[in-house]
Amino acid sequence: MKNTKTLLLAMLFLAAALATEAQPLQISKAELHDKIAASWIGQMIGNIYGLPHENKYVDLHGPENWPYGYSKNLDKLEKYQGAFSDDDTDVEYMYLLQMKKFGPEPTYAQLRDAWMYHIRDRVWLANRAALGLMHFGYTPPYTGSEALNPHWYQIDPQLINEIWAVTAPGMVDYAAAKSDWVARITSDDWGVEPTIHYGAMYAAAFFEKDMRKLIDIGLKALPENGRYAATVKEMISLHAQYPDWKDAWHAMAKKYYIDEHDMTKTIWNANLNGACAILAMLYGEGDFQRTLDLSCAMGFDADNQAATVAGLMGVIDGMKGLPENLYLPVKGWTKPFNDKYINITRHDLPDTEISAIINQTLETAIELIVMKGGSVTGEPGNEIITINPDATFLAPMEFYIGPNPHLEVGKTTDYTFYTEANKVYNWSHISGKIPAGLVFDKGRLSGVPQKAGTYKIDLRIDNGKENITRTFDLLVRPKNIAVVADTIYANIRQLNESVLDSCWYTFGKSLYAKDVSVINDGIISGHGTVFYSLAAKAKLPKVDYYGYGWNEAQDISMIVFNTGGMEEFGGWFNSLNVQYLAEDGRWVSAQKTTVSPALPASTAVFIQPHYAEYVLRFEPVKTKGIRIIGDAAIQDHWNKYTKFVSGFTSITELSVYP
């Protein structure tokens, strides 16, 4: 009896184990090609169709005079004799080329190099902030972190990352995790969650046609208590409550736009635009044209959800589900968008045939499927692809490069060199002296520094098979004497709020400090921390300065300048120098001044870093006053809003050290 019971228990355990192991999925190569083709063509339709509605409907949803049609963009389709690039498809095409070059799992460093080479214009918000941080020397995920990228909560990642799921058909967990990983190039926290949701839905859509079920599959991939999971559930509830989509829109817009917290209230908010897409999918009821028009009518950053949702519907039904008049809108075309993809947005991204993009995506998908335990069988022309749905994503091993730890004599520090996701690696201190008072253990530096100076240390990570070593420069600062200054020097002491209101500014109003006194309070982020020297409504070149004075002379040899958030039209220094107050009252330039890292090589807006730290060293001086001084930037990037605004700079903190 005992043996029978033991055998029964063993069989039950085996059955349970088999039940949790998903069965392999199968799809013909021809059908996979068709669905991949429809995902690309669908995104191109949605992007070009949705562009005239971008940012158009904010206070009220779009009118229900459907179908909207291509309207303003038909002339561009005729001009280019094919589809033209925009940020809903061009970054994905760039990513596809990196997968072709490096394999289906490129590293953050490889993707960063692609960003810095190909993306030189036509980039905004979180994407722009990430690009600036890349040029500053940082790698993802620091480029998307909430502490450094003040646009971390914007829509950017959910419109440029569908490719990672399209190349992972049926591998839902893999696609969700990889989408999360790549989304952190530009974003953080709940700002990446809609991207995870789309990743899961796209991967599942190769085998699931029901939109409602796809939304639920995506929901399971989200952090259970995350903001976007709650938002998706609420959109499902609104759909059940209101037969008319317009009533649901008003409830959604009130909560996620009108009543949104000031610090994250924008028309490009990731959660807000994700909610719009969920409503469009629910009220679209599986009809491509209706869902497309609803995506536009939901408003806010409408073209982005139109492209992503249209691409998802392409995966669901393949090319037969796409209306022919939308991919053959120009007389004489016989292939979707004339089989041309014309690059008008990215540096040195080649024009190509759409069929070539589709074939490259198919090849990459098959390579990844096989790499993750799948297979291809059958005769040429009749191949069957078997997919492992339990495939998982593990981020490539690499160092993440961001700000070094803030180390100051006598102050406790607790710094981890890696993000949570990469603590699976082994850490070693290879060479170089750890500053006295600090201990290094498993990627963590903790303790109380005892002696100021610069320390070079070599650290290594390994995964049991391979290892990487990198040198880190640790700066231990003496005590900051800015906090005991008797006066603050600045050419602009108060923010002109009326001038700010006349500009196209991109952060919550509560981020901005009203006067310069915040620059020595020791706080470099959060409410009321960023001071703009924005004063005049006359467009002038301007010299800005910030500094301190003491009643008693101080010995000084280093200043650390922390910038705040930048605007699309200004906020940075084009030049930067140090001056000290001589005994006769004149301001004199400090000798042998160096700035580390160097200021950006170009004054272009697209490479200016938010929340950057610059260390200025110079020959020691004994003085009662010190300041940084330089040319304040202004650009015509948004001329409509800035044509009468003077140059200005952004600052959160200015520290001074003996």
Image: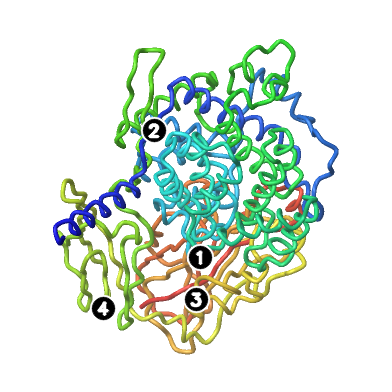
> Which residue is label 1 attached to?
225
> Which residue is label 2 attached to?
99
Type of residue at label 2?
Met
Q: CA distance from mark 3 to mark 2?
A: 41 Å
Secondary element at image label 4: strand
Q: CA distance from mark 3 to mark 1?
A: 30 Å
- Quadrant position of the N terminus in the picture: bottom left
Q: Residue at x 59, y 34 (%)?
A: 311
Q: Is 314 situated above or below 597?
A: above
Could you say which disc has been placed on residue 447 in the image? Answer: 4
564 and 265: which is toward the camera: 265
Q: Earlier in the sequence, mark 4 or mark 2?
A: 2
Secondary element at image label 1: loop
Type of residue at label 1?
Asn
Q: Is residue 269 left or right of residue 196?
A: right
Q: Is residue 538 left or right of residue 362?
A: right
Callout 4–callout 1 Cβ contact below 8 Å: no
